[in-house]
Image (cartoon, rainbow, N blue to C red):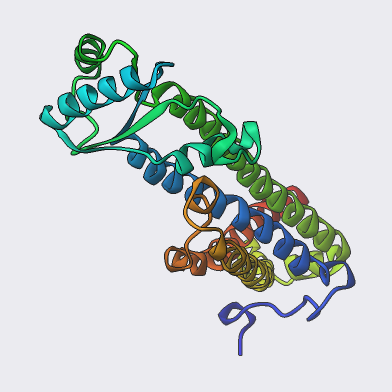
Amino acid sequence: MSMWGRTLQFLPKQHQREGLLPWVIGVMLFLCTLALASGLALGKGIERWSAGLSTNLTVQIVVEDEARRAKQTEDALTLLRATPGITSAYVQAEADVLELLSPWLGDVPFDAGLPLPTLIDVSLSSPDAVHIDGLKERLAAAAPGAQLDDHQEWMSQVLHLASAVQLVLAGIVVMVVLSTVAIVIFGCRAGLATHRESIEIMHLMGAEDAMISKAFDERYMAHGLKGGLVGVLLAAGTLYLINYLAGEMGQGLITATIPDNANLSWLALLPLFSALITMITARITVRRALAQMM
């Protein structure tokens, strides 16, 4: 059979310097997968979490006299429940208020005599169902000791932090991909230097650059696919373990940012992406080097 009808087999099945290449690519894909999954999960989790906060308001009644506080609480509840767009308004129990204050005050007993504000939890039908400034003015008239908190300032800080973290994770993904490309370029150049005499003989026999390049394409595509499978499998196992450990933590900001196992099917595409990147990088590197040999 003519050598022009098949791939040239002048490369050995395994070269010592290439033996670690799939494992290096696997490590790169492991880091890339974790960063990518964490960034996507962070965005979706923060979106779900902030959507829940954007439909909830908190009203504080800060009045020292108990009778006045009770009267203003009733007036505030009457106003809130009569406001269109508000689906519910209820007073939180003192136990819940103490639990909210426990990170700052520690475990405070019920009979400690500590003056506690009255907290009213308000639920909206949609984030823009109520004009917040207008509601604040009506509350101030009905209950002068009432303070309305729509969580916007605090939520904005959290969203800015999440955006910064996502930007860092995206930078990690880009650097990992570029590092993988650099490793493949180094491996190709080392392979070309090792087999330079064989390649020159092939040129003398009439072999075209595309034919010689095809041997490197297939070799490095296999390396990329193998390394990608290893890295993605390790990353999938790690993400599954994190989900399992976080399962008992309940719902909150931390668990909202954990990747969901049901939404990680896209991981199956990463080994193919790895194989494609390594093959294209090898092809460009080898053909440029072969053109310089002529």
**Res. 286 in view:** yes
Position of 187 with respect to 136 (left or right) is: right
Task: Give the residue displayed 55% in from the left and 29% down from the top.
Answer: 113
Position of 5 with respect to 29 (left or right) is: left
Question: Vertical placement of 140 versus 227: above or below?
Answer: above
Task: Give the residue displayed 52% in from the left and 54% down from the top.
Answer: 255
Q: Position of residue 177 (x, y in %)?
A: 64, 49
Quarter occupied by the N terminus: bottom right
Q: Position of residue 193 (x, y in %)?
A: 86, 59
Q: Position of residue 227 (x, y in %)?
A: 69, 69
Between 183 and 71, the one nearer to me in the picture: 71
Residue 67 in which image quadrant: top left
Task: Give the residue displayed 61% in from the left and 38% down from the top.
Answer: 108
Task: Give the residue displayed 47% in from the left and 62% down from the top.
Answer: 260
Number of numbered discs on residues: 0
Residue 111 in which image quadrant: top right
Between 179 and 108, the one nearer to me in the picture: 108
Between 30 and 294, the one nearer to me in the picture: 30
Q: Position of residue 146 (x, y in %)?
A: 32, 17
Between 64 and 162, the one nearer to me in the picture: 64
Residue 194 in which image quadrant: bottom right
Question: Vertical placement of 57 versus 266: above or below?
Answer: above
**Res. 148 in view:** no
